Image (cartoon, helix red, strand yellow):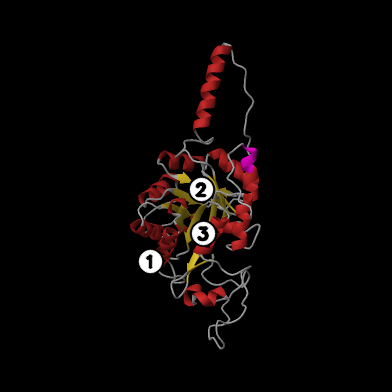
């Protein structure tokens, strides 16, 4: 953890002048993030990754409910699209046997049963909903209803569209976009919604469907290389100006990079530099890194001035925010 304050050296200037400079410095600190230039004046964004997968089974209604009880700014989640064009909340293109178990077939003799190990795009909504991944895979409507029932009228939703541009393991981009935008608009939560993706071509298409919805450009060093299919035709390198200009060119509100390599907390190669944060802010782009689980790393990134953090442990990040005297998002316990 980096130091948050340094000892003051006594100067020789008169007390009145020292007090004046102190007042000016405090005013400047209050007007900006501690690490550099601020993109926009906004509350720090505490995002519960997949609902807070360090605390509860990921992307489930119990996970989202627990994060509401803790008090988060944003519920972060992933969607996949089924064979019949319905969305389900889940991270993996293929149903993962380490997270999910089969229960029973939709109908006797179903040739696709067991469903675990199958691609979600090749299964119907009803088939996928029989699988137990800690609980039934929820829909966007169910998450929006959960928040509404809790009175969580300030919580945000960050919806990651899990399109994969490489190998055809996911449904077409248009299906993801149409379904997400339709459900967001139907629930009346457009102004509280972020759409994010590693597939920047998907984000460009979202902008065509809804010119006002906020877009977060997810990225990591493994996806930024010449002719990368992830960058929507852009030719970028892993360098602050290149990444920021790329995100800006597709209309992204924020750049959301992996915070370090490897991302498991044993930081060997930091991927979010002070220069990246400052360059983004100078261009009106927020910086919200993922996935940050160690309090020391949270402090270091917040010292650099990041605008939010995506974490598996929202309780830890909330405590770090409390230690730093930041405004905390409201909690929404079950009534």
Residue 47 in the image, given as x and y percentages of width and height: 55, 51
Residue 278 in the image, given as x and y percentages of width and height: 46, 39
For mark 1, what is the residue?
A: 174
- Please say whether residue 322 is one of the residues in the magenta stretch: yes
Foreground mark, 2 or 3, reads: 3
Residue 196 in the image, given as x and y percentages of width and height: 46, 56
Foreground mark, 2 or 1, reads: 1
Kindly state the secondary structure of the residue where label 1 is placed.
Answer: helix
The residue at 60%/53% (across/down) is 68
Numbered range of the magenta stretch: 320-324
**Quadrant of the image for the C terminus?**
bottom right
Q: 233 or 193: which is nearer to us?
A: 193
Foreground mark, 1 or 3, reads: 3
Q: Please give the label number shown on residue 144.
A: 3
For mark 2, what is the residue?
A: 288
Q: Residue furthest front?
A: 335
The tag earlier along the polypeptide, 2 or 1, is 1
Can residue 172 be seen in this snapshot?
Answer: yes
């Amino acid at each position: 953890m980096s130091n948050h304050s340094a000892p003051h050296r006594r100067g020789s200037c008169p007390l009145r002048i020292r007090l004046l400079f102190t007042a000016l410095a405090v005013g400047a600190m209050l007007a900006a993030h501690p690490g550099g230039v601020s993109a926009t004046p906004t509350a720090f964004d505490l995002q519960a990754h997949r609902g807070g997968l360090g605390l509860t089974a990921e992307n489930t209604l119990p996970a989202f409910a627990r994060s509401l009880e803790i008090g988060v700014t944003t519920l972060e989640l992933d969607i996949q699209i089924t064979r019949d064009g319905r969305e389900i909340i889940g991270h993996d293109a293929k149903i993962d046997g380490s997270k999910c178990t089969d229960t029973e077939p939709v109908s006797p003799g179903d040739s696709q049963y067991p469903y675990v190990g199958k691609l979600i795009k090749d299964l119907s909504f009803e088939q996928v909903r029989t699988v137990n991944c800690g609980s039934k895979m929820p829909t966007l409507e169910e998450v929006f209803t959960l928040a509404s029932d809790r009175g969580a009228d300030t919580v945000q939703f960050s919806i990651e569209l899990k399109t994969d541009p490489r190998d055809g393991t996911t449904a077409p981009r248009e299906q993801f976009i149409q379904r997400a935008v339709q459900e967001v608009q139907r629930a009346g939560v457009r102004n509280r919604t972020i759409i994010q993706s590693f597939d920047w071509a998907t984000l460009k298409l979202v902008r065509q469907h809804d010119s006002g919805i906020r877009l977060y450009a997810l990225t990591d060093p493994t996806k930024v290389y010449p002719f990368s299919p992830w960058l929507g035709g852009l030719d970028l390198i892993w360098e602050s100006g290149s990444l920021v200009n790329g995100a800006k060119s597709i209309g992204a509100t924020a750049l959301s990079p992996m915070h370090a390599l490897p991302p498991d907390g044993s930081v060997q190669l930091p991927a979010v530099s002070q220069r990246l944060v400052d360059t983004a802010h100078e261009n009106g782009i927020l910086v919200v890194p993922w996935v940050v689980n160690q309090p020391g790393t949270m402090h270091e990134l917040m010292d650099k001035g990041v605008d939010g953090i995506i974490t598996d442990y929202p309780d830890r990040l909330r405590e770090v925010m409390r230690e730093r005297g930041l405004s905390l998002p409201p909690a929404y316990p079950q009534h």
